[in-house]
Image: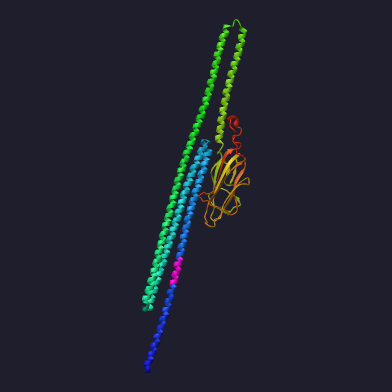
Amino acid sequence: MTLAFSNNEETRKKIVDTSAKIQEVLLLLLTDNDDLRNSLNKEAAERARETADLRDRLEKECGDLRDRLAKEIQERKADRDNLQNQINTNAANGDKSSDELREMIKQEREERKDQADNMDKHFSAENEARKKNLDDVNEWIGVENAKRQKEAEELRERMEREKRELQEFIDKDNKRMADKIDAENEERQRQEEEMKKRLKDAQEASENGTIQLYKKMQGENLAREAEIAELRARLNKEKAELAAQMEKEKEEMREKMEKENQDLREKLAGESNLLKGNIDQNQNHATKRINELAEKLAGMIKGGDIAIKDLTARMLKENELLRSLMSQPLSIYFDAFRTEDYDVGGEEYLTFAGTRSNLGGGMDAKSGVFTVPQAGAYMFTIHICTHDMKKGLLSIRCNGNELASFYDQNHDSNHKNSMAGQSIVAELAEGDRVQVYMYTHTGLMDKKSNWFTHFIGMFLRPKDFMVGVESSLDTPAITNGH
């Protein structure tokens, strides 16, 4: 009896110990399950936050691309309007100026084409970078999902190995967890498809805008060439009409003088016949009359020759004046450029790598100094592209005195580059020195294949233009409006 009671006590004690161990295992499994659930919730929240950040970043970059494209279109329109105004102003300056202007237009068209190609390459590279980033995100999500599935499988095997009675509970929990992961995967795939579609739409819109801009610029260049050809034809026609008019006036004057000479000859002949009939009666009077008529005839002939010479001299003078007026404006111009970055801080004058054109030899690219070879009105234009995280603060100076300034700064929000420029018209004296000065923290961006910095100067008209010509042309002198 005592032995049976002892055995029952030991069995009860084993059952109690086994129950306690089972409870400890259940508590441990429940704790691990809660930890895994919390970890999955945190990761899901982190994935949602990263997806939202990626979406916001993509929308911001697409907006920046649209803003840059709109700004580029506005700048092209402004350049087109400025060039059209220059063409209208300089259209009457002769064949030489038209040829030079056509060369400038051709160069400008090539530069626009290169810029359009560079923009296309830049946007393509950015789209490829976005695609690669999405592929990396997809690969990372797949690895994370595989890792989570592997951990769930190991947890299920451990729970089956430790206690068979908990199989149904663990199966239900694993199935719920797998359904949640699948739902998250489906949501991520849907969001990735939307992002890919938006990237594709943005790329197509960018390509279409670039093609339309190139076609529009090509049409505008063709229109400008047609206008230049029309202006040249009009100038040739006016030259021909002026020459024909001068020839006609000369011929009319010659015919008039010949007619007057013929009338004088006929009158002289009539009077000579009359004198011959009365020569015996009044020989002295007739001789005196003949001498007077001869002197009068000689004076009239001499006066006619002087009038012809005066008319010829006036025609030559007007022709020389027209030729001089056609050759003086735009007889001096330059275009200086840079081929490397500038990021050392400023407080010095800007220098250049070379010049694409330098008619008149006034621009020294190495020192950045333009020395005025002839007094008159000049137009200067400067364009720059700011360096990464740098500002642009520059001024155009004449003999050390500031004529105009321009700046571009506050890039903390976009960390990007931008274009800035300035244009002025100034009355200068011969020997004046014009330079571009850079202030502190100025940074410029230029590459071997991309010349963003350009300093351009053009001679508009000489000093005292058209002054003193009114006496020969019977027109008032043109002033500068002051």
Whole-percent x and y of residue 37? 43, 72
Q: Quadrant of the N terminus?
A: bottom left
Magenta stretch: helix, strand or loop mostly: helix
The answer to if 66 sits in the magenta stretch is: no
What residue sits 55% from the left and 9% below the top? 273
- Reply above or below: 339 against 43: above
Residue 196, by quadrant, is bottom left
Is residue 449 something that shows in the picture?
Answer: no
- Reply above or below: 137 against 342: below
198 left or right, relative to 334: left
Q: Which one is in front, 367 or 147?
A: 147
Is residue 128 something that shows in the picture?
Answer: yes
Whole-percent x and y of residue 383? 54, 48
Whole-percent x and y of residue 431? 62, 41
Whole-percent x and y of residue 392? 57, 52
Task: State the residue lying farthest toward the top.
Answer: 280
- Reply above or below: 428 against 165: above
Q: Which residues are magenta?
A: 37-46
Q: Which one is in front, 344 or 154?
A: 154
Q: Quadrant of the C terminus?
A: top right
- Reply above or below: 442 against 142: above
The answer to if 39 sits in the magenta stretch is: yes
Q: Which one is in front, 134 or 346?
A: 134
318 left or right, relative to 35: right
